[in-house]
Image (cartoon, rainbow, N blue to C red):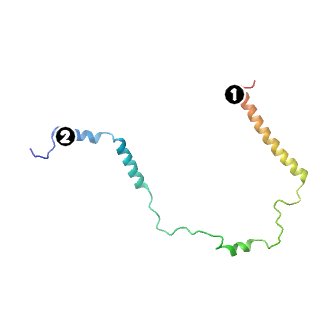
């Protein structure tokens, strides 16, 4: 018999060790290796061009209105009664939806009869 040949018991124990489920450490190592292997390599293309306002300022200036141009965003000929009624309507409808939603839940869950 050769000095390095495994005995029958050693062959059986080696076969059993291969058929055992991997330990927690082995699982962690396998997951880490899979994660490293699945990472995409960095692109070799040039980085994306950063657009700066200072580079395009002349183009932006062409789209602006001339100085002194009236810019009526919140100033206009809005009807005060109409706007007042619209604001009150929005607040009242919001309150109504909240109240009737709460009322429905109270009846549904049996707190109110």
- Tell me the SS state at disc 2: helix
Q: Residue at x 90, y 53 (%)?
A: 80
Quadrant, the N terminus: top left
Label 2 neighbourhood size at 10 Å, few (<14), some (14-19), many (20+)?
few
48 relative to 53 in the view: left or right: left
Q: Quadrant of residue 66?
A: bottom right
Farthest residue toward the bottom? 58
Comparing 57 with 78, the one in front is 57
17 relative to 93 in the view: left or right: left
80 relative to 13 in the view: left or right: right
Farthest residue toward the left? 1
46 relative to 75 in the view: left or right: left
Tell me the CA gap for discs 1 and 2. Answer: 69 Å
Q: Residue at x 76, y 31 (%)?
A: 103
**Chain-order first, disc 1 or disc 2:** 2
In the depicted structure, whether residue 14 falls above or below residue 72: above
Q: Residue at x 68, y 73 (%)?
A: 57
Quadrant, the C terminus: top right
Q: Residue 20: x percent and y percent?
A: 30, 39
What is the total number of numbered labels drawn onto the structure image? Answer: 2
Q: Residue 55: x percent and y percent?
A: 64, 74
Q: Are marks 1 and 2 in contact (CB under 8 Å)?
A: no
Find residue 10 and name its label: 2
> On the image, numbered disc 1 is attached to which residue?
109
């Amino acid at each position: 018999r050769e000095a390095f040949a495994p005995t029958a018991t050693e062959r059986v124990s080696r076969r059993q060790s291969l058929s055992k489920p991997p330990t927690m450490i082995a699982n962690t190592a396998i997951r880490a290796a899979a994660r490293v292997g699945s990472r995409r390599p960095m692109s070799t293309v040039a980085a994306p061009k950063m657009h700066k306002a200072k580079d395009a300022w002349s183009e932006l200036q062409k789209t602006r209105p001339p100085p002194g141009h009236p810019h009526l965003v919140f100033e206009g000929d809005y009807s005060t009664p109409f706007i007042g009624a619209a604001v009150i309507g929005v607040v009242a409808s919001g309150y109504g939806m909240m109240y009737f939603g709460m009322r429905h839940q109270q009846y549904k869950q049996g707190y109110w009869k």
